[in-house]
Structure formats: C-alpha cells, structure tokens
Amino acid sequence: MGGVTNRIQELLGVEFPVVQAPMTYIARAELAAAVSEGGGLGVIETLTPEGRADLLRVRELTDRAVAANLMIQGWKRDPSIVDVLASAGVQHVFTSAGDPALFTSRLHDAGMTVVHVVGSLKGAMKAADAGVDALVVEGVEGGGFKSALGASTMVLLPLIAERVGLPAICAGGVCDARSAAAAVVLGAEGVQMGTRMLASNEALVHANFKDAIVAADDAGTVLLDVPGNPTMRVLRTGLAARLSEHDSDAQLLGRITELYFGGDLEASVANTGQVSSRITELHPVADIVRRTWGDIEAVLHDARSRLD
C-alpha cells in the first residue's frame, strides 16, 4: 500500500507488515525465513529445543530480521530465555500466554522490541501498562488457545484500537488482502496469519493436514472447551467431535507431532482457525505476504464502488 510506512513497518523494519504466527513445532527456520525473505516477518517458536536451535540456524537461510516467540507460561520460572534470545541476535520478540510484565523490561534492557498477543481489552490494557511496544490483537476466530468468552476480531480490534494507543497487528480471520483491508479499517497497522501460512508450499507439515485445511468449510473448526484443558479452536475431525462431547478417554495434544508431520488426523487435535474455510489452495509464502498487503488498495477501491 502506497509509499508511506506505518508504525508497525517502522517498528519491525519490514516492507510488508505481515507476520507469521508462532506455532509450536511448526514455526521453524524454513518457514520463518521464507516469510522474512518475502518481505514480512517470520517468527520462530522457542518452547522446543529444535525451535531454539533454529534461532541460529535461520541465519543460514536469510539475513533479514526473524522474530522469536516467548510463551510466558513456559518460561516464567526461567528468565534465562532472554539470554538465549540475545545471544542469537533476536531483535523482535512476540510474547504470549501470560503476564508481559514478567519479561518486557528484561527484553527491552537486552535491546529487543516486544509485541504482546492479547485476546481481550483487559489484556491489552495490562500489556500497555507493562510497556510493550505493540500488540497482536487476536479474535476468537483464530486457531489455538482461546478464551471461551473471547470476542470476534470484528468487535475486539476496533475496541482495542479506540481504547489503547499502541500499534496493533490483527490476528484471527486473516488470509488475504480482503481480510487485511478489513483489519486496516478496523484499526490495525499489520496482520498476523497462522492457518494461511500452514497452507503454504514452505510449511513443513504433512500434506494431509494442508489438504484438510483446504477442504474445510465454514463449519470446519470447533471451539473445544473440555474440562481440565485449555479452550482451543481446532480443525473439526472425528477426534475433535468426540472431545466436544467430553469423551474422557480422548487425548487433546499428546500426539500432536504425529498429526503435524505424520499426517494422522486422528492422533491429536489440530489448532486451526475459522479462516480455513476461505483457503482453497496452497501458495508460496512470498506470494501470500506480498498479495495480502500489496493488494489492499485494490480491495478498498472495489469497496468504494459499492458506496456509490
């Protein structure tokens, strides 16, 4: 869009303010590098040893900035993760799943920018008080861990944009320029995509998982709220259907890698957003990044014709 950079582009130093979601096991060097090489910002997960090793390995694949995810619940008792990120030369950290005040000052002291993921106005205000630099505002449409009481992107994004002065990245329901244009109108200065990046040529997940995303319809996901487990939006599979009926013998995530990389769709639930119903084919990551942001002006031009 145009030649003017917005706050997210300036903060992250990217051509396109398009961020790849930090999916555990999946957000690895190859995918992150492809996103960054395409002009967006790739993100590497740090919960697994392989992910942490990729913070260094990714430098063999791109010289562009690649961010890291810090899932606070996983690291709140071990602040040494900050040293790991600093030693790898990480410039941008996306924090999530916990109180950002636990790490924001440490990360800033190490010279890193901090973007925190929120799913509520209360969470956004708390993150602003903690001093984060920007927010990822994720509606309940998005895949993965969610609140059963969470608001949709259509409601949550403008609410936070109106009440909190931080630059916002929209997540949940984004897969192309049309959804990105809507996000901009609602107050975002960038977008984050997970499910769309899964259905890409470069994502290393099994073809069965990609095919299931492409085949999903508008009822293709379910918000699981199983007692004793976190609420999650997942692909509607046979396992997910049994879990939604509170089958006490079914496991949620115990064999997740067998699904992601082995292609067994009944091995685990699969964190997938509602936007899967709008994804009809696989694309190269660079095309996804470029067209998602670069085609916004054309989408808005078409929208103006419907106002006449």
Image (cartoon, grey):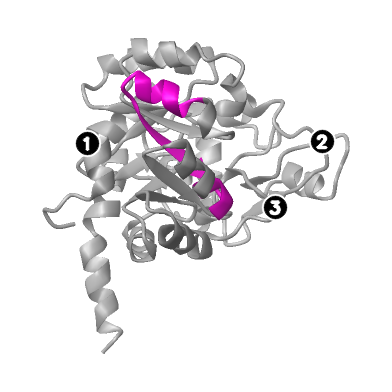
Q: Position of residue 278 (x, y in %)?
A: 46, 59
Q: Position of residue 180 (x, y in %)?
A: 35, 58
Residue that carries the numbered disc 1 in the rendered image: 13
Residue that carries the numbered disc 2 in the rendered image: 250
Pointer 1 with pointer 3, Cβ within 8 A? no
Pointer 2 with pointer 1, Cβ within 8 A? no
Question: What distance separates the C-alpha of mark 2 from that of mark 1?
Answer: 44 Å
* Callout count: 3
Query: Tag 1, which secondary structure?
Result: loop
Q: 275 or 209: nearer the eye?
A: 275
Residue 23 in view, yes or no? no
- Farthest right residue? 248
Callout 3, which amino acid? Ala
Residue 218 in view, yes or no? yes
Q: Which span of residues is magenta-colored?
A: 103-124
Callout 2, which amino acid? Ala
| Sequence-wise first label, 2 or 1 | 1
Estimate how packed mark 3 is, as few (under 14), some (14 to 19) or many (20 or more) residues with alpha carbons within 10 Å.
Answer: some
Q: What residue is rendered at 48% in x and 45% in y? A: 195
Residue that carries the numbered disc 3 in the rendered image: 148
Callout 1, which amino acid? Gly
Query: Tag 2, which secondary structure?
Result: loop
Pointer 2 with pointer 3, Cβ within 8 A? no
Which of discs 2 and 1 lies nearer the camera? The answer is 1
Res 114 → quadrant? top left
Question: What distance separates the C-alpha of mark 2 from that of mark 3?
Answer: 20 Å
Q: 156 or 288: nearer the eye?
A: 156
Q: Is residue 130 left or right of residue 32?
A: right
